[in-house]
Amino acid sequence: MPKENCLIVRAAGKRLDLLRGEAARIAKGANAGWWTDRAEIGTRFCFEDSKSKELFALTCDSLGITCQDG
C-alpha cells in the first residue's frame, strides 16, 4: 500500500479511538478511503488523498497529539 499520504501518531486507548473517528469523518467528507496500520512506534493513518492527510494533521495538533509523516 502506498504511504505518501500517511501520518504516524502515538496515541492509545480513548485517544486512539477518537482519532479513528476523526479520520473516518474527514475521509467521508472528502469522499476518500482511509486505513490504519501498525507502525514501529504508534499507529499509521493513511488516506487516499493529501488534503485529508493535511486535515487529519491539523486535527491531531488541535487535540495535542503529535504526529509525523510516515
Image (cartoon, rainbow, N blue to C red):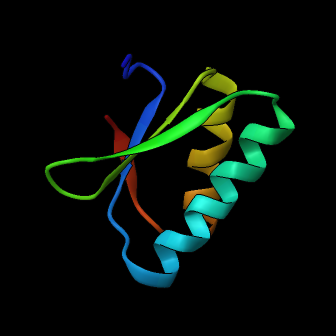
Q: Where, quadrant-wise, is the N terminus in this rendering?
A: top left
Q: Residue at x 67, y 62 (%)?
A: 21
Q: Where, quadrant-wise, is the C terminus in this rendering?
A: top left
Does residue 3 appear to the left or right of 22 in the view shown? left
Q: State the residue lying farthest toward the bottom.
A: 14
Position of residue 54 measured from the top left corner of the image (x, y, whole percent): 62, 35
Closer to us: 24 or 5: 24
Does residue 60 appear to the left or right of 8 in the view shown? right
Does residue 65 appear to the left or right of 31 in the view shown? left
Q: Is residue 64 visible?
A: no
Q: Is residue 12 visible?
A: yes
Question: Is residue 28 shown above or below 13?
Answer: above
Question: Is residue 18 shown above or below 19?
Answer: below
Q: State the residue lying farthest toward the left.
A: 40
Does residue 14 appear to the left or right of 22 in the view shown? left
Closer to us: 25 or 55: 25
Question: Is residue 51 shown above or below 27?
Answer: above
Question: Is residue 27 shown above or below 20?
Answer: above
Q: Residue at x 32, y 64 (%)?
A: 10
Q: Residue at x 40, y 52 (%)?
A: 67
Q: Residue at x 51, y 83 (%)?
A: 14
Position of residue 56 measured from the top left corner of the image (x, y, whole percent): 62, 46
